[in-house]
Image: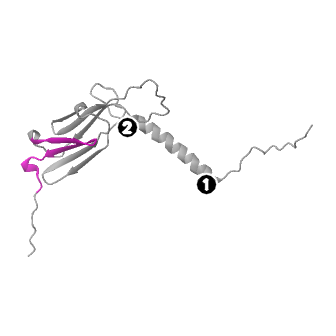
Amino acid sequence: MTFTRWNPLRDVTAWHPVSDITSEFELMQRDIDRMFDRFRGGILDDGTASTWLPAVDITEQENDYVVKVELPGVNKNDVKITVHNDALTIRGEKKQERERKGENYHRIERSYGSFQRSFTLLTSVVSDKIEASFDNGILTISLPKVEGAKSKEIEVKVK
């Protein structure tokens, strides 16, 4: 029979103030991110919550606004664009692939479901000249400004 000396601190690890606090903050940040991710989705017209929102860039040019929306995996026929009362609304659906027999999924992280994004336009647009194109998962919408809404450059004369 072999005797082992009992050591009450054998399984205790040393406390490192910087690394322990940093890891606690990282865990807290992940929890907060998860909480906000649940609310990041939008509210659809029927009152249900959207599970994901596509990223959007909006730029203003001299004659129009250009909206670019990231829609990877979305069919262009599943997207609807409307302009009503100076508000642009983009809605659609990213459909989930059906599980196939014989495939074992180890992780599913991609988001699926309906989405809706609405933006209030600062100036009126010419609704019958709005153009949209869909290329490589990027939806580009061109919203021409009404003639009176275009900015004018005025030269300042110094005397």
Question: Depth check: 137 or 16 in front?
Answer: 137
Residue sitting farthest toward the front: 102
Question: Depth check: 120 or 103 in front?
Answer: 103
Q: Please identify the quadrant where the C terminus is shown.
A: bottom left
Residue kind at label 2, given as amino acid type: Arg
- x%, y% of residue 18? 61, 54
Query: Residue drawn at (11%, 52%), measured in percent from left and top?
Result: 150
Note whether 101 is above or below 115 in the view shown.
Answer: above
Where disc 2 sits, the SS reads: helix
Compared across the picture, whether 21 is left or right of 56 comes to: right
Residue kind at label 1, given as amino acid type: Val
Compared across the picture, whether 78 is left or right of 131 comes to: right
Q: Which residue is mark 2?
A: 40
- x%, y% of residue 102? 46, 25
Magenta span includes 93:
no
Note whether 3 is above or below 22 in the view shown.
Answer: above
- For residue 55, the mark is none
- Tell me the distance, in whole angstroms, between the alpha carbons under discs 2 and 1: 32 Å
- x%, y% of residue 73? 32, 36
Magenta span includes 147:
yes
Q: Which residues are magenta?
A: 129-151
**Based on the displayed image, in which of its 4 quarters is residue 56 positioned?**
top left
Query: Residue drawn at (33%, 34%), measured in percent from left and top?
Result: 42
Query: Residue drawn at (22%, 36%), measured in percent from left and top?
Result: 89
Query: Residue drawn at (46%, 38%), measured in percent from left and top?
Result: 34
Compared across the picture, whether 68 is left or right of 106 comes to: left
Residue sitting farthest toward the right: 1
Q: Which residue is mark 1?
A: 18
Question: Depth check: 122 or 88 in front?
Answer: 88
Note whether 6 is above or below 116 in the view shown.
Answer: below
Q: Residues within 10 Å of mark 2 (few under 14, many from 20)?
A: some
